[in-house]
């Protein structure tokens, strides 16, 4: 009886760890995919605004896509915060802040361009490029934390 009870507890613990790892893997994978999607949407806005062939209607469409990508990214960020552990959640929060800076620059840029009918490339492109570069370290840190949390770092 005692042996069976211990074996059952060990099995329950193993099942819980498997469930937790699966939940984390799903959260991390979704968050990284949403990060890539938001990054692509931000670059699309920047590229549209930098193209002499684009129009304010193109800018508006790209801006709307960025808003949608931000919503998916925020959902993914929340999932990682819940899935944990703290190290992954903290690095995800750092990445969230870095992506927010990129997103806010292109949103401000697109809104100014749409409002004024002028792309303002010289005012915004360097700021965006700097923010885009600055997000690389938080992205790498999150990926490292995710590998460690999942035990896939060798």
Image (cartoon, rainbow, N blue to C red):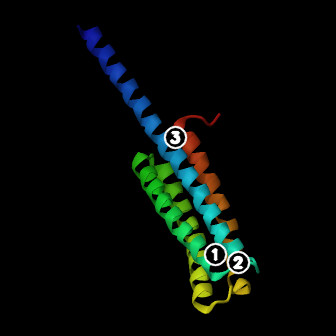
Q: Relative to 115, say whether 87 is above or below.
A: above
Q: Relative to 3, say whether 65 is above or below.
A: below
Report whether 50 appears left or right of 142.
right
Name the residue that disc number 2 marks: 54
Which is more toward the observer, 119 or 25? 119
User: Please, which residue is most extreme toward the right here?
Assistant: 52
Query: Callout 1 environment at 10 Å: few (<14), some (14 to 19), or many (20+)?
Result: some
How far apart marks 2 and 3 lie (CA) works out to: 44 Å
Query: Do callouts 2 and 1 mark residues in contact (Cβ within 8 Å)?
Result: yes
Report whether 30 appears left or right of 13.
right
How far apart marks 2 and 1 lie (CA) works out to: 6 Å
Q: Nearer the viewer, mark 2 or mark 3?
A: 2
Q: Residue at x 59, y 57 (%)?
A: 37
Name the residue that disc number 1 marks: 58
Name the residue that disc number 3 marks: 149
The quadrant of the picture occupied by the C terminus is: top right
Query: Callout 2 environment at 10 Å: few (<14), some (14 to 19), or many (20+)?
Result: few
Image spot of residue 122 (x, y percent): 74, 85
């Amino acid at each position: 009886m005692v042996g069976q009870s211990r074996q059952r507890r060990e099995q329950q613990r193993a099942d819980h760890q498997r469930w937790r790892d699966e939940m984390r893997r799903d959260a991390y994978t979704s968050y990284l995919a949403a990060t890539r999607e938001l990054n692509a949407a931000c670059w699309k806005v920047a590229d549209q605004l930098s193209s002499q062939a684009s129009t304010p209607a193109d800018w508006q469409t790209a801006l709307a896509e960025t808003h949608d990508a931000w919503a998916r990214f925020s959902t993914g960020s929340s999932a990682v915060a819940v899935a944990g552990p703290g190290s992954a959640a903290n690095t995800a929060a750092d990445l969230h802040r870095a992506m927010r800076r990129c997103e806010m620059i292109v949103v401000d840029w697109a809104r100014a361009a749409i409002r004024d009918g002028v792309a303002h490339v010289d005012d915004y492109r360097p700021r965006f490029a700097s923010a885009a570069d600055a997000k690389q370290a938080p992205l790498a840190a999150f990926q490292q934390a995710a590998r460690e949390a999942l035990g896939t770092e060798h």
